[in-house]
Image (spheres, rainbow, N blue to C red):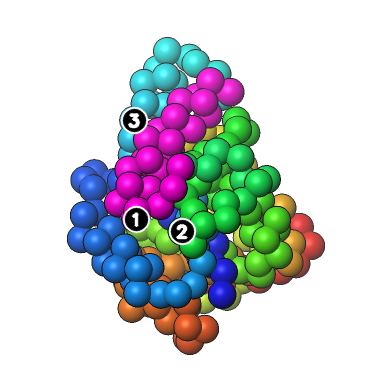
Amino acid sequence: MIHVISLGGSAVFGDRFDLFFLKELKALIKKSKDIFHIVVGGGKIARDYQWVGKKFNISDNPLDQIGIKATELNAELVSHIFDAGTVIKTPEKPGKERVNIYSGWKPGSSTDYVSVVVAKKLNIDKIINITSVGYLYDKEPSKKDAKKIIKISKKEVIEKFKKKWSPGLKFPFDPKAIKESNGIDILIIGKSIKNIDNILKSKQFKGTTLFDSKV
């Protein structure tokens, strides 16, 4: 089986590197006989650099370039940790190894978008999106009355949240990528290794499913 994973930078490269999670994920992948295509996000490293750029009124295109460089650094580290090959920067040409690591691609989109491109090229019908939050919520997760969303159509997500891509956008999955993901379910989950393993084995999992619809 082939899996496409969008590994959110905030999940691994937040205020501090989550070494324990990386070790667990490496062990899970090593134990599996499946094929993995893992796209690594920029996380706090990217946002910190972009924050400085915004203070100097740097425009979106170069801010995206800065973010892409951060994803390349993160992906390089993950690639060595997982004993994978060279980091892939052109998702239109997916890797052919058992474990393939991707960085950001081009301005105007995120690593979530890269995962959609890879999934389409490989005819994969779902993307596992690992985030620091673990679910999509009906409002900001920090609010006490925020409720978890278990299933929602992509059309509803676009209409309800009205998010647009911008460098450093904080949202579980890039809205541009959602619009381009027809035919692909997006599974938003947290960092529980058992939960990830359940998905790999097509079992029930905890998280949010964005299902297909015209957007």
Q: Nearer the viewer, mark 1 or mark 3?
A: 1
Measured as percent of width and height from the top left, residue 52 is found at: 36, 21
The amino acid marked with disc number 3 is Asp
Per the model, the C-alpha gap separating discs 2 and 3 is 29 Å
Asked if one can make out residue 4 in the rendered structure from this viewpoint, the answer is: yes
- What residue sits right under mark 2 in the picture? 99
Outermost top residue: 56
Measured as percent of width and height from the top left, residue 144 is found at: 33, 65
Residue 18 in the magenta stretch? The answer is: no
Magenta stretch secondary structure, dominant: helix
- What residue sits right under mark 1 in the picture? 82
**Which of the two discs, 2 and 3, labels the residue nearer the N terminus?**
3
**Quick one: label 3, few (<14), some, or many (20+) residues within 10 Å?**
some
Residue drawn at 62 percent across, 45 percent down = 91
Q: Do the numbered discs 1 and 2 sit on residues whose CB atoms are within 8 Å? A: yes
**Which of the two discs, 1 and 3, labels the residue nearer the N terminus?**
3
For the C terminus, the image quarter is bottom right
- What residue sits right under mark 3 in the picture? 48
User: Left or right: where does residue 78 sit relative to residue 89?
Assistant: left
The amino acid marked with disc number 1 is Phe
User: Left or right: where does residue 129 sit relative to residue 117?
Assistant: left
Residue drawn at 32 percent across, 43 percent down = 77
User: Left or right: where does residue 57 sit relative to residue 174?
Assistant: left
Specify the segment rendered in magenta. 61-86
The amino acid marked with disc number 2 is Val
What is the secondary structure assignment of the residue under circle 1? loop
Residue drawn at 23 percent across, 54 percent down = 18
Residue drawn at 66 percent across, 69 percent down = 125
For the N terminus, the image quarter is bottom right
